Amino acid sequence: MEKIRARLNIGSKAEPVKLRKRKSQLYSKEETCPLDNGVLGVTVFTVAFRLINCFLVQTSFVPDEYWQSLEIAHLMWTAGIRGFSYPLFFAAIYKILHFFTYDAVQLLVWLPRVVQALLSALADIKLYCLIQSLEHSDVAKWTYLCQLCSWFTWYCCTRTLTNTMETTLTTLALYYYPLPGSKTHSSTKYLILVALAVIVRPTALIVWLPLLVYHFWQEDNKLKLITHLCLPIGALTLGISTLIDCIFYGKWTLVQYNFLKFNVFHNVAEFYGSHPWHWYFTQGFVVVIGPHLPFFLYGCTLASKRYRIMLITIVWTVMVYSCLAHKEFRFIYPVLPFCMVFCGESLVNLRTWRRPAACALLVSNLVPALYTGLLHQRGTLDVMGHLQTLCDDRDPSTPPLPEVLFLMPCHSTPFYSHIHCPMKMRFLECPPDLTGDKRYVDEAERFFADPHHWLRTSFPYKSMLPTHLVFFDVLEMELSAFLDRNRFMRSREIFHTHVPEGRVGKSVLVYQRH
């Protein structure tokens, strides 16, 4: 009987049943990015892709990619409408290179762009991970493809523009933003990144205003959000930025206020050109999104409610910038990653036509990406490489060093950041009028109005003339008498663009005095 009782465990205390614990990615709160072969493969590919991107972009876009970053890091500036925080980032890179005696010109030119390429790669990865956490893997993969094959992203994401850094920080912040259903959200992290974006470029607040309002509206504890996060983060970043600006300007300067006062309230930016109110809707946005446009429009009709705030942000940003007189393609670049989400949604829903559509999208973006990156407007960079050889061919301690005069629209070329030697150089200046004088005419305008008169008054004696002149070929005929009289001979012709316009010619010419 005892044997039967023992076999049936009668009267004995049953052991508790132990269940095996399983980890579920679906309900995990960790900030993970599950990929088919792990995040490492996507990371390596993205980094390699953006580095190739960096070295295949050898053209100039706008002067600000040098004159609001590298040139300021090299020499620093005097006006009070731009902050030093962003140029300080590149100045630190230069200082490290100098400390280790690796401050060669090629490193000074390329290392800042390589760093920006790596940051852009990080933003690409975070965009993929965000969509992967919100949707099934197909949507994430096709969104990732759309992001990588965007011609305008290829053209801009490795440049040292404030708009590029603004876009990078905006994409990183979006990863941590509390979108409905997001498992990667962190209010602290995204607000810090938004604050940094505003410090780099105050107009980043335009993009983030609807997103911030939406977050505030959805937040249960609104008072805590304001008092524990928004105010401390905003005060700290603004305080550090203001301290940096005060140190370098040597006086009390609130750059963010000055930026708004001159560019928005006084509309000083109109000095650099203006466009009609509809320009972004009829040209700007169409060019920036490029061949993605039909996919974006189709994706807008398919996207779920959680992406409605992103669509509102895109429309809001384009509308606000349309109210400003001065318009440029790069101003709306920060909303381009938002558009890629809708493009990814549309590709997924094309089903049997998905791969042919993706191939067409890739090819149609490849042509403008390579053309604008390798050919269009490259002469103003190539000429700096040519001028830099003038330093290499001479002993800097042996006078006279070459003297170069740029007779081009102001800031057409980079400056000492691409030369890095004490060669004397001068360009036609065009600072905006901050006094309200309606009779104000800048130096560049005075030159182009009457080149011979400007040259006679600026160089009354031949001994004062520079050794080299650099200008676009559209000026050659007009300056021919002056060049012959003063024994200037053409030493180099450098291709610039296939589409010359106005004062910008097809080639850049270098004349040397004999």
Image (cartoon, grey):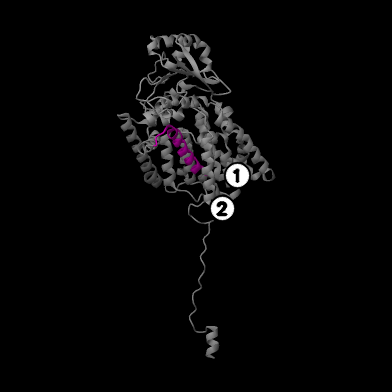
Kindly identify the amino acid type of the residue bearing the numbered disc 1: Trp
Determine the secondary structure under disc 2.
loop
Kindly identify the amino acid type of the residue bearing the numbered disc 2: Asn
Q: Residues within 10 Å of mark 2 (few under 14, many from 20)?
A: few
**Residue 244 image point, x, y percent:** 33, 35
Mark 2 sits on what residue?
A: 37
Name which residue lies at 47% across and 23% down. 412
**Quadrant into which the N terminus falls:** bottom right
Instruction: Name the disc covering residue 483, or none.
Output: none
| The one of 491 and 109 positioned closer to us in this rendering | 491
Instruction: Name the disc covering residue 142, or none.
Output: 1
Could you tell me if residue 301 is visible in this image?
A: yes
Magenta-highlighted residues: 102-124
Determine the secondary structure under disc 1.
helix
**Residue 437 image point, x, y percent:** 39, 15
**Majority SS type along the magenta span:** helix
